[in-house]
Image (cartoon, rainbow, N blue to C red):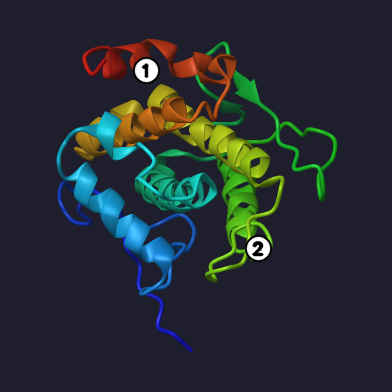
């Protein structure tokens, strides 16, 4: 069995007071695979500091595969970022999954939970990250073998994953930014979110109305790079 090696885009694992604790196990991309090569390409272009260029589809590459590789990496980034604030996010501190006073999210996955349920933020994020992990581990949705085609509904699934991952960023920014600053993680969070936003903007992957909870921040982070 081929050894699986994790390659993480862009941000160093150490630094600040970050522990290597993640909320869920990291999703690895097999070393030696084409997707691993794509990740290395993305890592190299991220190093240039030009995020607008870094998110563009590389010449001759398949859009589905590029979206798949980056979706896995955003899952790993958000996993690590939320892992740093789990001590501050409890059923008592966050009894509902919210992003400021105007936005509240109820969980449904269409399979196990069909009718949206109101639950605490840690419970919602646990449901969300478990659901994303299940999608990423499904070889029929996210094929890791060369020559295995992506399903026709891949982009629709990827959009749903990214829409839901955005909600974790939104919750962290609105409810836990004090903790993020206390942990000296704000530069890491901002860089990760900026990369995420540039990526979803490049390929129109999240409806603008879904981004409303962080619209001011998005404008601030992206205006100077236009």
Position of 188 with respect to 65 (left or right) is: left
Could you tell me residue 51's position as x and y percent? 26, 33
Position of 149 with respect to 31 (left or right) is: right
* Closer-to-camera residue (7/212): 7
Quarter of the view holding residue 177: top left
Real-space CA distance between mark 1 and mark 2, rounded to the nearest whole angstrom: 32 Å
Q: Residue at x 41, y 66 (%)?
A: 34
Position of 97 with respect to 173 (left or right) is: right
Q: Which of marks 2 and 1 precedes in the sequence?
A: 2
Q: Is residue 182 visible?
A: no
Name the mark nearer the viewer: 1 or 2: 2
* Closer-to-camera residue (209/79): 209
Q: Which residue is mark 1?
A: 218
Could you tell me residue 150's position as x and y percent? 63, 55
Q: Residue at x 71, y 36 (%)?
A: 107
* Closer-to-camera residue (196/109): 196
Q: Which residue is mark 2?
A: 138
Could you tell me residue 90's position as x and y percent? 51, 40
Vertically, is 190 above or below 147?
above
Q: Quadrant of the C terminus?
A: top left
Vertically, is 146 above or below 221?
below
């Amino acid at each position: 069995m081929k050894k699986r090696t994790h390659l993480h885009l862009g941000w160093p694992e150490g630094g600040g007071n970050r522990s290597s604790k993640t909320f869920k196990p990291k999703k690895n991309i097999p070393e030696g695979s084409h997707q691993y090569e794509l990740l290395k390409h993305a890592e190299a272009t991220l190093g240039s500091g030009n995020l607008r260029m870094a998110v563009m589809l590389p010449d001759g590459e398949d859009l589905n595969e590029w979206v798949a590789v980056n979706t896995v990496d955003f899952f790993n980034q958000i996993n690590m970022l939320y892992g740093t604030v789990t001590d501050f996010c409890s059923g008592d501190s966050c009894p509902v999954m919210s992003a400021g006073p105007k936005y509240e999210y109820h969980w449904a996955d269409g399979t196990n939970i069909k009718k949206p349920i109101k639950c605490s933020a840690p419970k919602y994020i646990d449901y969300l990250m478990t659901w994303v992990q299940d999608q990423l581990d499904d070889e029929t949705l996210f094929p890791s073998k060369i020559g295995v085609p992506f399903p026709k509904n891949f982009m629709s699934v990827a959009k749903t994953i990214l829409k839901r991952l955005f909600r974790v960023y939104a919750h962290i920014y609105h409810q836990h930014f004090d903790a993020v600053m206390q942990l000296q993680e704000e530069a890491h969070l901002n860089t990760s979110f900026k990369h995420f936003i540039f990526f979803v903007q490049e390929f129109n992957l999240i409806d603008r109305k879904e981004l409303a909870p962080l619209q001011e921040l998005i404008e601030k982070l992206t205006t100077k790079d236009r």
